Amino acid sequence: MALLGACLFATACGKDKETILVQEQQTADQVYYFSGHIYDGLTGQRLTGYSLDLQFRDKKLSAQVDAEGRYFVGPLPYFQDYTVRVKADGYRSFLSHNAGITLDWNHESFLVHEHAPEKGFYYNAFLYPDDLVAPATQVFVTTWDTEKRPSGTVRFTPTNVPAMLDYLPAVNGQIWNNADDLQLRTVTKTVTDGVATIEAGELGFGVHYDVMVYGAAGYAPGIAGFLAGIDDYVTVVLDPLDAAGLELVYNSITTGIPAPNGEIVLAFNQPIEFDPLHTAAEYAKYVDDTLSIDSWDENGNGKWNELKNASRGTAVQIKGNLLILRWNPQEALATVDDNDPIYSVTYGALDSVLVRPAGGKYWERASIGMLVGTTSLTVNLR
């Protein structure tokens, strides 16, 4: 090794291809050894009376376990997927399946210690007594936009995250997961008014579960983690589904056809309602106060069509996905000259009329002015 190290650093060792050849010769038989401890997942105590096997291809290597419970096993060649089996009386079966370790070198590095023919890794594992029963637990489902508790379905799926990961030391998260835990059944329950109950023994003690709540009307699925037998309960918070925003899909003015009754019809991509920030009557008053007409004294008799200074009876009405603006000349006019034509009616203050999708939330509201792109609309009567 000393000679090889000197060769790597000496310029006399030759060209790059020769250096690469030396590296390949050095790493061609790189092997790996494992050591560590096995713990009781409930108490956190080290176990001593266990056996551990390292299995790959057609090989099975038995680990040495000392009096303090430290194991040592190897060598494992590179590029070999492997299984670690741990057996201990009174504990659940343990099998950990792992991808092979790749060669640890590159053409740009000449450091001998990075290409050592032997490497050691420290790994821990956790076993759980086979007579442990996970207690009953509850799932609480909430939302952040309403106090009403949703109903739906919750699913517990076992996953490879060791329950004691946060409680005991490990080297860079080097903990063998128990693949046998993944064979435990998935548990599905109905959520009613935000609550579901898991009975005692339905989950595996010490097993980490991915918890998903789905099927709640108007809400996206929510997820959380749960350590059976360790966590008392699990809470899942659901987010509302992203609703389609309001869009104007029809404006009767754009047809160019006069409306003798002065009516404007606006259609949207979904049913709408007035935003409850104000009443329907208040929205109508905003428009009514700004109503104007295009008319003058054409016959020169000194009399013309003139709007009242008080309420003019303007209607702002919602029917499904339609918003209708309509005036009533009998209520709107203080003076009338039938010989003076009224050419158009203008409805203003549309930026003060707020609507939202029917049953929608406050953050979905929009003004009619924003949706039509103007604060006023003029309709020709002739």
Image: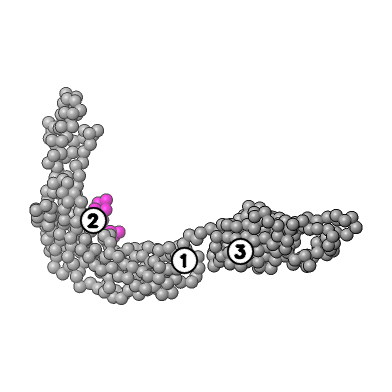
Q: Position of residue 310 (x, y in %)?
A: 79, 65
Task: Identify whether 252 is placed above or below 315.
Answer: above
Q: Amino acid at mark 2?
A: Ile
| Picture residue at 63% right of the left edge, 57% below the top | 251
Would you say residue 273 sits in the magenta stretch?
no
Q: Which residue position is annotated with label 2?
A: 175
| Picture residue at 20% right of the left edge, 28% below the top | 16
The kind of secondary structure element at disc 2 is loop
Q: Quadrant of residue 326?
A: bottom right
With 87 as the anchor, is 109 left or right in this view? right
Q: Amino acid at mark 3?
A: Leu
Q: How is colour applied across the structure in the image? A: one colour
* Number of other residues with Cα within 10 Å of mark 3, as a class: few under 14, some 14 to 19, many 20 or more: many
Q: Amino acid at mark 1?
A: Gly
With 238 as the anchor, is 60 left or right in this view? left
Look at the image and tell me in which quarter the N terminus lies.
top left
Q: CA distance from mark 1 to mark 3?
A: 23 Å
Looking at the rendering, the stretch of residues picked out in magenta corresponds to: 165-176
Whether residue 333 is visible to the viewer of this picture, yes or no, is yes
Q: CA distance from mark 3 to mark 2?
A: 62 Å
Sequence-wise, which precedes: disc 3 or disc 2?
2
Front one among 370 and 361: 370
Q: CA distance from mark 2 to mark 1?
A: 40 Å
